[in-house]
Amino acid sequence: MSFTASKQGDITIIEIEGQLIVGNRQALKQMVLDDLEKGTRKVLVDFARTGYIDSSGLGVLVSLAKKIREMGGELRLANLSDDLQTLFELTKLDTLFQISETRERALESF
Amino acid sequence: MDVRSAEQALDIRIPSDVQYIEGIVQQVVRRCELHAFPRRHLALNVPVALTEALSNAILRGNLDDAARSVHVHAEVDSSRLVLEVRDEGQGFDLEACTVDPTTPDHMMLEDGRGLFLMRRLMDHVERFSDGGNVVRLILLRGVA
């Protein structure tokens, strides 16, 4: 499992490969917080290559969304598989996040 | 890590370290796959619910103390998966944990979704004491 960050204009795109779970959620949180420190306010998390997410991973996304909004920015999500979409619906987090079907649509939505 | 496994049953004892979780999940999913569990179970229900049970055992039951261990017992057949995760903690009252993380008051909190997800993704969740604190999860395979 790993995270890859890249830039498209003023948007930071983070790809999560593998799982987002209790063992690595802190690494994702720190990566985004470091980016916010550098001035980034638009963050897109791309789940195209993500396996599963546990409650810790969901919790980190909620925490980051809150933090970024407080700083006047936006966290958006893209490329959820059907299983991940179900997870977000079960927890009603699909109502909290703006979720796009593709990375391109998510980038256009900022 | 001490591993004893038969064709269907799996017995693993691990130190209290969350880095062991993914490997255990893979072994249990593989066994469910051999018994033709539905794809959704393999990709969502089993990995997420088992990860929740293991992280609860490691972080809350054993207080992240690497000197303590967690024991996982899994039995799979063509009708169901039975998982037991045992830690060395004091246990907790499962029935008293009724917080709904989907309400507006709780939606923005970072924690509090683990038990909710176990209950939603498994057919049966119970806790009991048996030489330690045990959480038992049961998932029915259903019609494949």
Image (cartoon, rainbow, N blue to C red):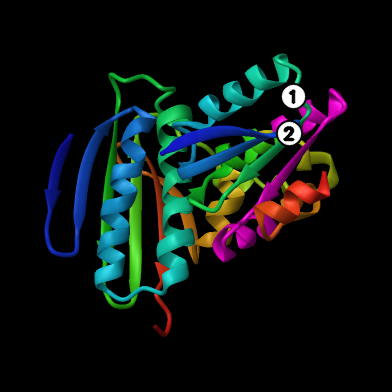
Q: Quadrant of residue A14?
A: top right
Can I make out residue A91 in this image?
no
Q: Residue at x 57, y 43 (%)?
A: A55
**Which residue is label 1 attached to?**
A40
Of residue B27 and residue A44, the one placed in the foreground of this image is A44
Q: Quadrant of residue B71?
A: top left
Residue B111 percent across, percent down from the top left: 65, 35
Residue A81 percent across, percent down from the top left: 57, 61
Report the magenta residues as a range: A63-91
Of residue B64 and residue A76, the one placed in the foreground of this image is A76
- Residue A9's tag is 2
Residue B21 percent across, percent down from the top left: 35, 40
Determine whether A107 is above or below A105 in the image: above
- Residue A16 falls inside the magenta stretch: no
Q: CA distance from mark 1 to mark 2?
A: 10 Å
Q: How many marks?
A: 2
